[in-house]
Amino acid sequence: MIGELLQGLDYFGTAVFAITGALVADRKRMDLMGFLILATVTGIGGGTLRDLLLDRPVFWLTQWEYLVITAVMAIAFFYVGRPFRQRAGWLPWADAVGLSAFCVIGVQIALSMNANPMIAVMMGIMTATFGGLIRDVLAGESPLLLHREIYASAALIGGIVYVLFAQWLDWPIVAVIAGFAVTLAVRGLGIRYHWHLPSANG
């Protein structure tokens, strides 16, 4: 059951992140190829970095359905996404959902390879944030990862919660739910109340 839950969450996170890539492409008035590129790198970028660092086969080279998901999201939003284009304010919330899903997936995959818990949390953060980083760089925007907002720190907290439940308490299903929920809650509160981390100048 846990395997099916994580697989579904991974597909879901890929679709949501692909949508955020398509929304950014729309804001930049890109053509269809631009939509496809931004949707794809956002959807699979974090997992690609994770797999390379963990020295495991890059997932989308053998699981072609991930590329299909990103392509479908890009094409759908290019042709029929007009209603959503008028509500760009929900982009941070869609990104928050993808962040939460990929945080959990990244931590779990690292733990399944017997990685140290601290390394597993780092893999969760990278899986959750690197796709968005590539998206913002390609779109010529300041990467959200480098802002003062509660972003990577939300994945850090969610990743720690996942490790606590999955490895120390051995409650894998609770770990998935709690890790996702905590990451989303922390990021959501940051969006809602404009929380941010202190900077060098205060």
Image: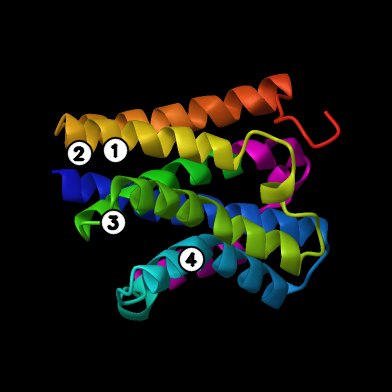
Report helix, strand or loop for mark 3. helix
Say if residue 87 shows up in the picture. no
Residue where numbered disc 2 is placed: 167
First in sequence: mark 3 vs mark 1:
3
Residue 101 coordinates in the image, percent (x, y) = 42, 44
User: Which of marks 1 and 4 precedes in the sequence?
Assistant: 4
Disc 3: which residue: 109
Determine the CA span between mark 3 and mark 1: 12 Å
Contact check, label 1 and label 2, Cβ < 8 Å: yes
* Frontmost residue, 93 versus 200: 200
Residue at the spot of label 1? 163
Q: Nearer the viewer, mark 3 or mark 4?
A: 3
Q: Residue furthest bottom?
A: 61
Residue name at image x 34 percent, y 68 percent: 54
Marked residue nearer the N-terminal end (3 or 2): 3
**Residue at left offset 43%, top offset 46%:** 103
Task: Please tell me whether residue 192 is drawn above or below residue 157 in the rendered image.
Answer: above
- The residue lying at 39 percent from left, 46 percent from top is 121
Q: Which residues are magenta?
A: 65-93
| Kind of residue at disc 3 | Ile
